[in-house]
Amino acid sequence: MSLSSEIAIPVSEVTDAYVSLRQVAKTYASTRGSIAALLDIDLDIQPREFVSVVGPSGCGKSTLLKLVAGLEGVSAGSVRVAGRQLNGPPDRLGVVFQRDVLLDWRTILDNVLLSIEFTRKPTPAERDRAMALLTRFGLAGYEDRFPFELSGGMRQRASICRALLADPELLLMDEPFGALDAMTRDDLNVELAQIWQDTRKTLLFITHSIVEAVFLSDRVVMMSKAPGRIVDTITIDLPRPRRLAVRDSAEFAGYVHRIRHHFAELGIVKE
Amino acid sequence: MRGLFTGESEARDIIAVLASALLLWELGVRIFHPSPLILPSPSMIVAAFLEAPALFLRHLAFTLAMTLLGFVLAVVLGVALAVGIIYSRFLERTAYTLLVALNSIPKVALAPLFVIWMGTGPEPKIAIALMLAIFPIVIDAVLGLRSVDPDMLNLARVSRASSWAVLTKIRFPCALPSLFAGMKVGISFALVGAIVGEFVAGNYGIGFQILVAQGQFDTVRVFVSLLLLGIVGTVLFFLVDYAERLLLPWHISHRARSDRSVGQFAN
């Protein structure tokens, strides 16, 4: 697969988007030649916008998140966050991974404080903030427990608290609820929608659940199978704050159907 | 059923098993009367020990000192080497490859060399104990230091953690369970090393006592030494095990001892 630059759509380099990807491609070297994971990715995320990326397994959506997190470099194109070309993780970034990656030997509170403790000793104000976040996520009383004493949903809540502690501008979430059971997942969807409503982080959310994406997002970005390309972007115009009941509405069903139908047309899912 | 083998009281189980074995041994000797040159009874062994307890304990103390010195040096050097191997491609390619290669030769066969190099004092004993103990420690420490979830390391990068912070806050604690596994093997190997060192040269220690008793065809005294070694080896192993439990109460192998024991027997 060649990267021809003559088809590049001229787009303005100057943008007020918080995250801006231009003609991004990512290829990996392997023993059987290079493998393209992402191709021709153009994506802008406005400040305080909630954008989800949905796509089949292996479509490169996690790679996309790693590029925006500055954990991996692009093979072509550019990634800008807060107007600056990335050369490593950007400032004021919080990340939540699919696995909660809590440290087994630290209490929940100490795990939440970890992102600060990597560089310095947390202040009493930061400890208070950590406690407030834990309380907010229903984990008050569990701050001195160890991760193995908590359920999967509680652990993932703690890892969200950890990402929010330093009050990031940009929050990246890589299938954070993918490993949870359906009921816990619904709970966490509602809680995340609520906290986003209150704090208005710029949020890039990776998921393979269309329902989850529609429920949470302002815009849903659809990706094709490898090499991952953006096949469509759908603006979700549902009222906020969103409660679970919104999923029973005809508009909601319409969005879900539209996205699923589009994936089916592309041969990515069966209808 | 609670009690024996359910992990409710490990110490009691161990004592019960050992006591039964000794009792069977004593009974066997009393019934079949083998020559004491071949197999003395436990009571004869205890009696021989009580004839000269100070002598045995002095030699045992020497062997124990060699073992512990060798072991402690193996842990310090082994962990330092493992950290070096993790952070340096060069060391991984050279030191680690060499270690794995050397591990496959019978290291006991190298013991005479140490006598040539270091003489007949305590040094070669400590060195051989160190050499035997360091292999499992380095190999398990490297394994442990590498067993960190890549997303944990990603999180550290996003949080701008220094290499030192990653080592001390993530990698090292994460490696502890594996390191302890290596140390449990290492402590037993260190004892083997100390004895081998005493076999090869020197005039002190339990290994030397065994050689002297063998020269006199004094089977009972050989058994006294063996029994003492068995006790010391067991105690050393459980001391490491105890330290592990104190340090790693969060680790999965200590969360539900009884569940684990049941699981093992159900396999």
Image (cartoon, rainbow, N blue to C red):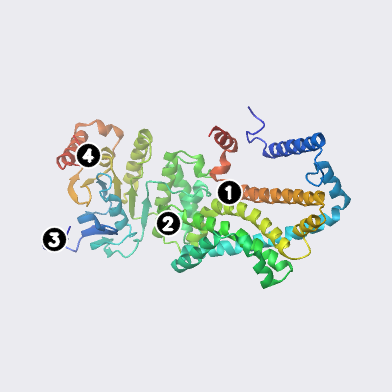
* Kind of residue at disc 4: Leu
Circles 3, 4 touching at the beta carbon (< 8 Å): no
Q: CA distance from mark 4 to mark 2?
A: 37 Å
Please check whether the numbered discs 4 and 2 fall on a single chain: no
Circles 1 and 2: CB atoms closer than 8 Å: no
The one of A238 and B187 positioned closer to us in this rendering: B187
Nearer to us of marks 1 and 4 is: 1
In the displayed structure, B184 sits above or below A80; it is above
Given residues B147 and A172, the one toward you in this image is: B147
| Residue topped by disc 2 | B153
**Residue bearing the label numbered 4:** A238
Chain letter of the residue carrying label 4: A
Residues at marks 1 and 4 touching, judged by CB atoms closer than 8 Å: no
User: For this rendering, which residue is in front, B20 or B37?
Assistant: B37
Residue appearing at x 21%, y 54% in the figure? A43
Q: Residues within 10 Å of mark 2 (few under 14, many from 20)?
A: some
Between discs 3 and 4, the one toward the N terminus: 3
Q: Please tell me in which quadrant of the rendered image residue B3 appears.
A: top right
Q: Chain of mark 3?
A: A
Q: Which mark is residue B248?
A: 1
- Mark 3–mark 2 Cα distance, whole angstroms, equals 35 Å
Left or right of A28? Residue B135 is right
Q: Amino acid at mark 2?
A: Leu
> Which of the numbered marks, if any, corresponds to residue A8?
3
* Residue A155 picture location, percent across and down: 44, 43
Label 2: which secondary element: helix
Q: Mark 3 falls on what kind of element?
A: loop
Q: Residue at x 52, y 59 (%)?
A: B168
How much space separates mark 1 and mark 2, taking CA atoms? 21 Å
